[in-house]
Image: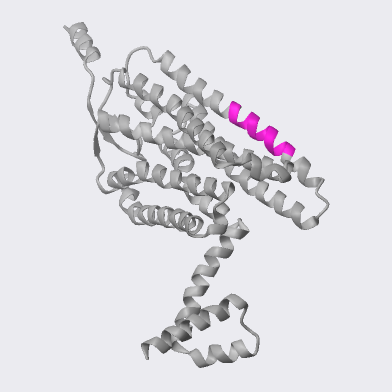
Amino acid sequence: MGEDGNTSSFNSSYTNFFLVGFPGLPEWRPFLVLPLTFLYVTIISANALVIHTVAAQRSLHQPMYVLIALLLAVNICAATAVMPKMLEGFVHYANPISLHGCLAQMFFIYFTLLLDYNLLLAMALDRYVAICHPLRYSDLMTSRLLGVLAFFALTRSLGVAVPLVVLTSRARFCRTVVIRHFTCEYIALLSIACGDLTFNNHLGLAMRLATVSFDLALLGTSYTRIVYAAFRISSGGARAKALHTCGSHLLVILTIYLSGLSTSIVFRVAKTVSQDVQNLLSAIYLLLPGILNPVIYGVRTREIRQHIEKTFCGKELAREVREKPERLQNLRVKGKLPGWTSSIWEIGALTSGNKR
């Protein structure tokens, strides 16, 4: 009788689950809703600001800045794939989700993650050409090449995400309906699956290692050549700018790749690590790019930062023009305002004149 019951349980498969993120911290969950909501809004706003700046400024319509805008758009999609459901889980302890919804979320998580990796590779190629072959940059980095790189990024991302989702959809989930995670990650779903999961485990780890190894080999080769070329630049300012750009990129690359790899290793090797620590590692590698990238590429990239500052300073000065035109006129006469500020004053003066 017991054997028949076990066989029946083994052959059945749950199709509805409950996501329970950070299961060891139930008393803290309500207090995390507001900080996480603020974090989500910040990720969307900061990334969207840089994207808008790149799109609005003609001087930024160059391959490097287009790639940055695409990377930040992927960050918005990645955060949106994870955080709304994560926030729902902190409001309600048991966060229901269907198998199809879980598989869809898993697809978008890994698809956007791989797109992030591929765009970092494209940016490394762009910097390599710009620094090592500056005279041929405009001939090599064309819109056609960007199209080829985009096609490669989409194809490679689909080539990893689709097999993982298809393989997971064929598994039987008979252990429990509770997924002790805030999102439907591959390793989280495997933890509640039954049967022989050796192939699934090995495939997931092999794909992760192959992706990281291949990408880091290309990135390491590219940035080694870039740094070597940068030190050969005679101009100190140009050399500093090249190293500054490479340093920003390497910071993002190491953060994304190492945090993602550590999650896979901890889950498979360190069995004694708590679910809360595993959840925290996943949150870091899934959400940190959306936090870091607009800072690295918005604040640390001079051209983008200047346009953002000009946008906000321009609005402030335009407001002051309407409120205190005489003061700004005096500053302009004394030569204390730069040329672009003077132009804003003239536009404001004309506007005020028309209103009168």
In the image, 334: left or right of 46? right
Q: Which x, y percent locates residue 74? A: 44, 43
Quick one: 252 or 10, which is closer to the camera? Answer: 252
The overriding secondary structure of the stretch rendered in magenta is: helix
The structure residue drawn at horizontal position 51% and vertical position 93%, both measured from the top left corner, is 326
On screen, residue 296 above or below 266 = below
Query: Is residue 184 in view?
Result: no
On screen, residue 93 above or below 354 = above
Picture quadrant of residue 302:
bottom right
Magenta span contains residue 224? yes
The structure residue drawn at horizontal position 47% and vertical position 86%, both measured from the top left corner, is 349
Q: Which x, y percent locates residue 337? A: 61, 82
The structure residue drawn at horizontal position 37% and vertical position 91%, both measured from the top left corner, is 356
Picture quadrant of residue 309:
bottom right
Q: Quadrant of the N terminus?
A: top left
Query: Start and end of the magenta stretch?
Result: 214-225
Quick one: 17 or 351, which is closer to the camera? Answer: 351
Magenta span contains residue 101? no
On screen, residue 318 above or below 21 = below
